[in-house]
Image (spheres, rainbow, N blue to C red):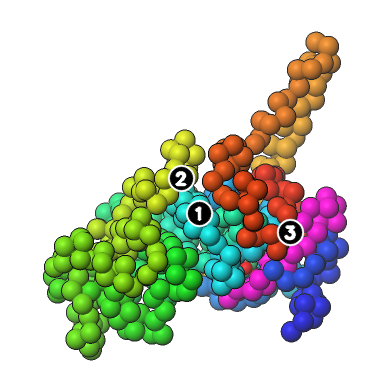
Amino acid sequence: MSDEDLDRHVDRHVLKRYDTKGVLGKGAYGIVWRAVDRRSGETVALKKIFDAFQNSTDAQRTFREVMFLQEMKGHENIVSLLSVLKSDNDRDFYLVFECMETDLHTAIRGNVLQDIHKQYVTWQMLKALKYMHSAELLHRDMKPSNLLLNSDCVVKVADFGLARSLRECASETKADDAKLTDYVATRWYRAPEILLGSPSYSFGVDVWAVGCIVGEMLVGKPIFPGATVLSQCETIFELLGKPDEERLRAISCYSKEMLAVLDDTRMPQGPEVLNAGQYLERWRRRFPGVGDDGLRLLIEMLRLDPHDRVKVIDALNHPYVAPFHNAALEGDAGFTALISIGDNEKKTTQVYRDKLYSEVKRIRAAERAQRNEERKERSERAAIAKRDGGGGGLAAHRGVRADTEHFGDASAIPAHRGERNPFDATSAMPAHRGDRRSYFMDR
Ligand SMILES: Nc1ncnc2c1ncn2[C@@H]1O[C@H](COP(=O)(O)OP(=O)(O)O)[C@@H](O)[C@H]1O
Ligand SMILES: [Mg+2]
């Protein structure tokens, strides 16, 4: 289908507000257009989720996506949801995001990332994970196409359709080992405990996925491209070694049955048998040309047993991301991400839709109130400044983000030192990069 044909899928009332400028991407659930907000002139990304409420699983996904994006809003490495719109038929749903230039999948395929970019991307992914995990939120679908990228190599995590809060399950079981089911993340990035059918998993699933992404950046292609769940396990064991039965049982109580059919003659010994040097040597052979710092972090993120896997906080202290590490920029959320319908409750599509619409109304009202408050504050300040003879206005750079400042002074990215920017092919950074404004619009 051409872009023009696709444009026909956008409701008329949406086109009145947004002028679509071509397709940015397609996912399993929707199409994303670059679009210009006709009122503000701002370039945005308009995502249409087709049949967003067609069954309760899809409705729950749509609900989660909006609610968790709203919860996570404000972090510089998480995409900002600016607005949402209903469709005329009440079946589809639109999300309006800040617009990014590309995604990591495209950047990896285009072979445009230099080593320092890979380190910068890794650091930003870890920083975003630290924030999400501190809010007890699992993303559960970290993969290159869900990581958006700008020409200055800023990364933003997108696609929260599979995200879920750990907190709401905590009352049923141990706090950090909640019972979680009905979850199907993209196979190549799926952690062993999920592949092996464990109903209890935790933050380690995101760490594993980020490990797979780092590996993919380092070698330019997916590192575990299994065609089935079983072959996925095989490709993993071919690198990591097949663990003994006891360890497999610790990862999942169903491992033994699942793996009974595996031909393990090709599988090498694991890190519990080899010493660290021998194990590293295997990774060097598998990933020739990749530096040891990258390999060592990879090994720590890709530990089979989630209990052995590096924690995000420790990964941020790893030498591989040392050029960027700065504890002051790697903050916690300071709250727990919770949404009004828990993941353990399965509701009808109608309930999710109604709840979503009412939540959106509530959020808009709160934001309107906040904007009014800010406007009032601004005019009061202006009045004071005028009375005092001017000059005392708001500091121009009050809203500048921490990482922008960091990037500005101590940029380690070659492009910022006047060297060739591998992203030069794409246009300059969008003007609204620093904009956290949100204006959930009425419809
Ligand atoms: N804000 C955005 N800016 C630029 N491109 C985007 C944006 N959001 C999504 N995309 C592109 O659209 C694709 C699909 O978006 P995504 O939210 O992952 O949808 P799905 O839930 O269908 O997977 C992404 O892989 C990316 O290429
Ligand atoms: Mg996606």
| Residue extent of the magenta highlight | 25-47
Q: Position of residue 273 (x, y in %)?
A: 13, 68
Given the current orientation, which residue lies at the most extreme top position?
Answer: 388
Q: Secondary structure at mark 1?
A: helix
Q: Is residue 13 left or right of residue 341?
A: right
Type of amino acid at the residue the image marks with label 2 = Pro
Residue 364's x, y, as percent? 69, 48
- In the image, what residue type sits under mark 3? Ser
- Identify the residue at image location x=68%, y=55%: 98
Residue for badge 3? 427
Q: Residue at x 36, y 45 (%)?
A: 317
212 or 439, nearer to the observer: 212
Q: Residue 168: in sight, yes or no? A: no
Q: Is residue 318 at least partly visible in the picture?
A: yes
- Say what secondary structure mark 3 lies in: loop
Label 1: how many Cα within 10 Å (few below 14, some 14–19, many 20+): some
Name the residue that disc number 2 marks: 323
- Per the model, the C-alpha gap separating discs 1 and 3 is 21 Å
Q: Is residue 250 left or right of residue 318?
A: left
- Compared with 6, 293 (above or below) is above
- The amino acid type found where label 1 is placed reads Ile
Q: Which mark is residue 116?
A: 1
Front one among 355 and 262: 262
Q: Are marks 1 and 2 in contact (CB under 8 Å)?
A: yes
Query: Which of the marked residues, 1 or 2, is nearer the chain's N terminus?
Result: 1
| Vertical position of residue 135 compared to residue 247: above or below | above
- The yes-or-no answer for disc 1 within 8 Å of ligand 1 is no
Residue 192 occupies quadrant: bottom left
87 drawn magenta: no
Front residue of 133 and 171 = 133
Q: Residue at x 77, y 70 (%)?
A: 22
